[in-house]
Image: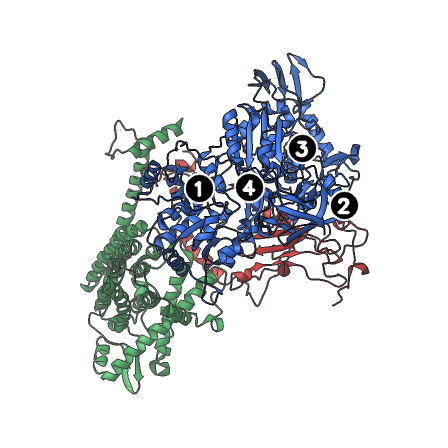
Chain colours: A green, B red, C blue
Amino acid sequence: MINSKGMVAQLLGQDPGWVIALKGLLIFIFCVVLTIMAVWGERRIVARMQMRLGPNRVGIFGIIQGLADGVKLALKEDLIPKTADKIVFIIAPIISATTCFMAFAVIPLTGEVSFFGHKTVMQLTDLPVGVLYVLAIASVGVYGIVLAGWSSGSTYPLLGGLRSSAQVISYEVAMALSLVAVFIYAGSMSTSDIVVAQDRWWYAVILFPSFAIYCISMVGETNRAPFDLAEAEGELVGGFHTEYSSLKFALFFLAEYINILAVSSLATTLFLGGYRAFPGLGFTETWLGGWFTLFWFFAKVLIFFFVFVWLRGTLPRLRYDQFMQFGWKTLIPVSLAWILIVSTLRVMSDQGAPQYLIFGFAFAVVLIYLVISNYSDNAKAKLATDYKNFTPENPEFPIPISNRTEQVIQIRDEAKK
Amino acid sequence: MTKNFEDHDSNNLIPRNDEFGLSKAEQDSKFIADQAPAPLLKQLLGFWVTFKSMFKKVNTVQYPEVKEPTAPRFHGRHQLNRHPDGLEKCIGCELCAWACPADAIYVEGADNKPNENYSPGERYGKVYQINYLRCIFCGLCIEACPTRALTMTNEYELADDQRGKLIFEKEDLLAPLRNGMVKPPHPMYPNTTDENYYRGEVTSAHPSQGTVNND
Amino acid sequence: MSDQLTTTTDVTLKIDGFEVTVPKGTLVIRAAEKLGIQIPRFCDHPLLAPAGACRQCLVDISINGRAFPKPQASCTIPVENGMEVKTQLTSTVADKAQKGIMELLLINHPLDCPVCDKGGECPLQNQAMSNGNGQSRYEGVKRTFEKPVAISSQVLLDRERCVLCARCTRFSEQIAGDPFITLNERGALQQVGIYEKEPFDSYYSGNTVQICPVGALTGATYRFRARPFDLVSNPSACEHCASGCAMRTDVRRGKTLRRLAGDDPTVNEEWNCDKGRWAFKYESARNRITTPYIRDESGVLREASWPEALSEAAKLLLNAKSAAVLMGGRATLEDAYGYSKFARIALQTNDIDFRARLNSNEEREFLANARPNATYKDIDDADHVVLISFEPEDESPIVFLRILKAVTKRKLAVTVISPIKSRGTEKLKANFISASAGFELKAIEKVDGLTNRSVILIGERALETEGLLSSVEQLATSKGAKLGWIPRRAGEVAALTAGAIGNLLPGLRPVQDAKARVDVQTVWGINQLPTKTGKSTDEILKDSDVILLGGVDANDISSSAKSQLSNKKIIAMDIRFGTSTEVAHVILPVASVVEKNGTFLDWQGKPRSFESAVESLNRSDVRILSMLADEMKRPINLPTVKAAANEIAQFDKWEKSTSNWHVSGTNTENLNLGPTEAILNSWRLLLDRGSLQEGEDNLAGTARKTIIGLNRTKAEKLNLVEGELVKISADSVSISAPLKIVETEENIVWVPRNSTGAQLVSKFSKPSGIKVSVSKA
């Protein structure tokens, strides 16, 4: 039973080599199988949301659809465009795929279990800076996209790649900022320690704004709907993976799904208590010699996956400038403000401030928010009325004069007549 | 404020949020991108809609196990009809080829020899081809046919794997020979003209026309 | 329309409020067309005299304010000053009248449009839509006839559809002079009919099919074959005779389906003959050559590729002791030019002759030196036309129509010097001077009344009498009359202009003239041209050892031509297998007329260009010759028809060179004929066993029967009865045919030259002018 910090690191430190290798292999297989099922699952779920069945021809209920897709991709003609940079072209999907797998290295899948007679945790390794490692790996993963887009030697991939990478890194910032609150509360960046720190309250509850920001930014990070403009077919053909076919495309495909699973796993670990059972069902954690925790972990990841698919089936696509604006102008400021509040409250409680001070501080924050929002509303209204009364002779604020301005003035004058 | 679509300023010079203080009715009457955003809970209702529809009855029809029947006047494969005594109705006039907007029909007419008629009257369709790779199933040819020789059946399963196989010849399109019909060429019904056939006054074959089909 | 000899004054009138000025005598309907106002009509035709039979073209007319009480047929009323015409566009009375006439016409018209050949190009359909009521009020029974009736093997008559416009009867009577169809009966039962004993035996019956405004007269060949929207039409030129008719070739899916007469007022107006209209099946016949062939050592023809065949042909030609070119008279101008240049540059000889037929040296001199200058217009303006050794109805039908038009309209005087009085001569109401082949010189002296407005037309057959061409030319020059030389084939004048003959270079430049040679050398970019006058056809057949044949049939040349050819090495360029390919060592396929571009020159020398109507892999003669010359390393640089045409255009006009070329004829008065002997005379009928008419049985059904024509006195002397089978023989060769009594001289027997059972060129030593014995068969 893991219930204190540092226990996991100790446990893992004693793993013999074969256990580590086997764990790595199992994690790899686990990821790939999950991807294949995810392909099927996504298609069927999104189909049901659209009042149709998904694929149901290939196996019973179409279960091996993902496998069929994989085989199909493998058998396709492998094209490398003439203007492409061959080496980089081939390396880019490898980078993408590899980094996704690597993110799983620090995710605790189960609690303490007996693995072929050896007592261990289903986690490949435990770094004291585990989550930082994951964020670093995700940043390296951006290389895959950027290099893919550039090395294709074609305009659409280049544009798509640039957009994708810009999007990913901006949401990474938001993601990282939202995790800062978690670190403050958990006191550690090690994944297993964070799981341990959630034995009273899940961070999804007490750090709800962080959780919300993290959920939004994880969707943006993985280029999924509604933030998938960079790879929407109508906009940029295929984005950064336009020129890819056959197995290299399969790698990107794989990378995308594993990315989804990776960020979901991270969310589970950091906010939903990892492999811990739902509140009240704690007794199940010892079933099957501890292996039942895998089920809990799995269930939470699947819930996240379902939410991904739900988002895709429901929301229309956001325009690129809209979501970049959202990421930089909304998420990050909110994140920063929240971090400020959290850290202040934390310091106050650490330093033993009385309750009323803490509540007073919280109340003040709320008051300031209301005042600011009211002021901003008024400012917007004034701006609007100012525009209505705008005359070019005496502008109250400088406006760049262009042809369009004159046209607008003309249109409005004619409408007045 | 005009309601004209063209007047909508797409250049963001006039800010979108100039509707503060407007009533809901005024709001709803504006161009959709100019309206204020809905409250949060209302927006989350969309998720409930998709979630709910996961449990609704699916629209999928499991073809080919389940084949939904087609409407009675469905535009399917063409058929060249016959008169009750076996003579073909098609007179090779090429009006269907004329009407076809996709140039899918090729017709060559020919002379009926005396007492060796393929169709009542002087002229019959010797070559009749419909290229189903060009046909758009619009039915203009059926509307054009003066003798109702050309009609459409409800058969739509015409997919094939070779281009040549999808050019249907006359034999592929002719209606089958039914009981009581005589296989052409054979003489017309005694003492009739093509007008009698057209009016539907010939309802069966006469023994003098040949051996009647009985299978 | 209006006779060019009378002066015209202009008349101004108003139609639908628009003013128009037209020559006096113009019909109102023509004046309206000048303004772009189309008045519906059926019986009216600009080339036929007005009839006013159909009454469709009714318009409201008033002259100087005084209106006609009833609407008038605008096709019969000539214009007047101060006339105001209101057509259906501005007058409700005229509109109602036209609608009423259309309704009446449609009452008895059968509902045949789906099965009628005219559907899609039918003036009745179009005008019923534009000027008729939308609905019929007729509920009775339509009158029916038995249909269709074959009035000849080519033309089918459907009496129910006839709108009684009388265009066909008027055409046959006025233009063709063959009044074999008339309108019989009256009232609702009026119908077109033929005279019971005589079918519609006219060489121009096809024109009635073309001018019939409904589907009453249809052609049996085109019956039910296609609809107008299937056809791709191309303007083309007729490749049969030298009349130079403009044609319209209609093609469906790469196959020629019909050829209509095109509109060229200066040449064929809107008419053509049955041969030009219907004899086109030869080019899709089964025995078309599609690949080159080489005859191997055992004498068997085997297929070969183009490079192989060309190298074999080049080898033969380069190793020849004396090579020559024999081309037929059916090549286009560009192809003939190719042959001409090929002979001079690749073979370095002048041994080329386009006269793959009977020929003579006098004819060669005549062609080089005489400059025939008659045109169709000259016939229109002539005061006297003389036809010598020329049977227009058989040898150039459009010239016949032209002369007949002048005879009908202004009683032109025609003199014919010919063995027998043919039907054409009778129709022309000509002064007939009978003269057997070989004896025309005497007859020429009987011709009088020649002025500088007269036209003398001499046919190809004149070469068969020595001295005839010379004396006719001298006659024409002395009287200042216009001379016209009319060959039988479409490509002969072009071949002459291209220099495809031994004594001429391109542009009628004599080979013996140094300045002419320099001209040609400049255009061709070479230093030296062969200076020796080339051999003629007969000499080529005798002396040359390798001959390039371009569209030649040995049976056209003489009876010994085929055996002469079999002793030589032959390279045959032809479209079908025939006599030339039987003896050839290398066979190269060429394109037919519909598959290539080209230009034909008619007998006047007027060019008519045409483009290919059908896409095919066959190449034109000039292209093959260019490839062959390249293979022989003596290039002629004419890879396309356009290149040839451009080069031809670089030649300036050559001024005539005078030289004394006339030959005096021998007097063969005394031929010492026995009582059963006669002098053989013949000419080719329009429809006979010609190879370009193959494949068209319907047309062959209208050909005139083979007969042996004798004077009545002679027949009685020999105890022969008309219709009896008679034999003529000479040198152990004989032919038999039924006897017919014809108007001719006593010592003349006449047989068609190339009809069924009588192919004279290949059988007798000469097809005309020899003694033959006549007896019962």
In three-dimensional space, the C-alpha distance between marks 4 and 3, rounded to whole angstroms, equals: 26 Å
* In this view, C283 is above or below C273: below
Q: The residue under label 4 is which amino acid type?
A: Glu
Q: The residue under label 1 is which amino acid type?
A: Asp
Q: Which residue is mark 4?
A: C464
| Residue at the image position 48 percent from the left and 39 percent from the top | C362
Nearest-to-viewer mark from 1 and 3: 3
- Can residue C36 be seen at all in this image of the molecule? no
Which comes before the other along the chain, label 2 or label 3? Answer: 3
Badge 1 and badge 4 in a common chain: no
Quarter of the image where the N terminus of chain B is located: top left
Quarter of the image where the C terminus of chain B is located: bottom right
Q: The residue under label 2 is which amino acid type?
A: Asn
The mark total stands at: 4
Q: Which residue is mark 2?
A: C719
In three-dimensional space, the C-alpha distance between marks 1 and 4, rounded to whole angstroms, equals: 104 Å
In three-dimensional space, the C-alpha distance between marks 2 and 3, rounded to whole angstroms, equals: 30 Å
